[in-house]
Amino acid sequence: MTGRRSSRGTFLPSRTRSVRRTLLPAWALLACASLAAGCGIVPGATGGSGGGSVTVMTWAPENTRATNKPGMPAMARAYARWVNSHGGIAGRKLNVLTCNEGNDGVAAAKCARRAVKEDAVAVVGSYSQYSDSFFPPLESAGIPYIGGYGVTTTEFTRALSYPVNGGQPALLAGLGKELAAHCGPVTLVRPDTIAGDELPELLNAGLRAGGHEPAHDQRAAEDATEYSDQADLALRQASADPARTGCVIPALGERTNIFMDSFRRARDTYPQVRTAAVLGSVNQTVIDASGGRSGPYEGSYLSGWYPVASDSRWDGMKKVINEAAFGDNRVDPEDAGVQTTWIAYTVLRAVLEQIADGEVSTSSVRRALDGGLEVRTGGLTPPLRWRHSGLLAATGFARLPNADVSLQTVRQGRLVPATKGFVNVAKTLENAG
């Protein structure tokens, strides 16, 4: 996560944008010929018989020095290929535009403006920490943001945001609540960014719920190539109490594994400490690459939004990946971004099936979401429904429909459930801030 402060946009009246066939000028078709390009589009996905086509966009950072989520747009393209090969959704072809958000506020705003220009009826399953940059263009056009990754708390307050998970707030609060009973001093190593500034209080809300003192807040550059100094400091802080085993929690996104490499080299000179992380920073692929059972994650606690990737509830997603991703290794079923995009498109499918043969527009998509539509995801999440009511309505998480987290641990090099089922952190989040 990187960050530069920008002015917060205001909500402007939305305008209805009817679905129509998207026509690209010749230069745009040439520029977007490659699926790997930042302005990707699924070839042959426009038009179609019967109900025509529905245009949506998915964006995420790719090829940056910080956190990258190339699997999210790649998953969106695979999903479009799959549904279109099976007759579309409610008789309509799905036209997926993709955009490289670049971990940059200007680029995020450009992606949003492109969604407006291309008549997208929704932005689906995307990642960006620059909510102050992309929400104003979307809001001015009334375009809903379905299934964002939840990098910032803003995604849980905006009227046109329809999250599918509890984002970073739920992950940190759930992790803190679990670790309170197992850790002595806790050190959080997090990005020195605007988005990173939100993380300590979320973790501390969970620690407080378990009767634990606040964590040490340690900032680090998110695009560093090594973290020797930060690893030494984290270990020193976490081992300050010889009577209790401390815990170190790196929350550096894609750079977490680089931090852990420095941490592994430094830890032998300090007393034993435990590690913990949030899924999205660490998954089974990362654990395998770092040594599995002999690596630095063995015994770690991790919090996530969904069941472990080996759970049979992911079989539907894996079938689509096998049939439509064509061996694209960016579409990793272990990746929380890929999983979030899958669930977001599950929501979109439910919306389009409810609209059926009616007009599909930004307004009709919002009406379906705001009108009490309940989306079931086969047990990957609780039933999703968006409304301004309930426990979190008076907090900074009024749009959050899913405060469940899964707690996992690394045992014999494999991610396995640490508890049975999900843990709900709604009350913990209510006390955050």
Image (cartoon, rainbow, N blue to C red):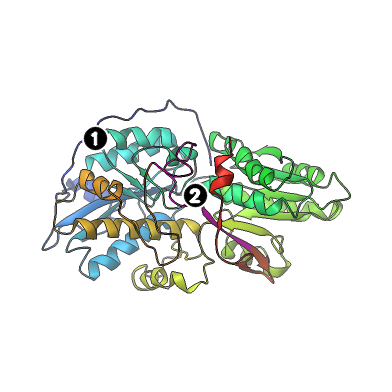
Camera-side residue of 266 and 212: 212
* Residue at the right extreme of this rendering: 242
| Residue 288 spot, x, y in % from top left | 62, 67
Image quadrant occupied by the C terminus: top right
Q: Is residue 342 left or right of residue 142?
A: right
Q: Which residue is mark 1?
A: 14
Most common secondary structure along the magenta stretch: loop
Q: Is residue 313 left or right of residue 197?
A: left
Residue at the image position 39 percent from the left and 51 percent from the top: 147
Which comes before the other along the chain, label 2 or label 1? 1
- Check disc 1: other Cα within 10 Å, few if <14, some if 14-19, many if 20+: some
Q: Is residue 207 left or right of residue 132?
A: right
* Residue at the top extreme of this rendering: 7
Residue 221 visible in this rendered orientation of the protein: no
Above or below: residue 3 compared with residue 80: above
Above or below: residue 77 compared with residue 85: above
- Check disc 2: other Cα within 10 Å, few if <14, some if 14-19, many if 20+: many
CB within 8 Å, label 2 to label 1 = no
| Residue 32 spot, x, y in % from top left | 28, 51
Above or below: residue 321 compared with residue 429: below
Q: Is residue 433 left or right of residue 94?
A: right
Disc number placed over residue 381 in the picture, else none: none
Q: Which residue is mark 2?
A: 166
Label 2, label 1: how far apart the Cα atoms are: 26 Å
Is disc 2 placed on a helix, strand or loop? loop
Mark 1: amino acid: Ser
> Where, by quadrant of the figure, is residue 93 drawn?
bottom left
Is disc 1 placed on a helix, strand or loop? loop
In magenta, the rendered stretch is: 389-408
> Where, by quadrant of the figure, is residue 296 drawn?
bottom right
Mark 2: amino acid: Gly
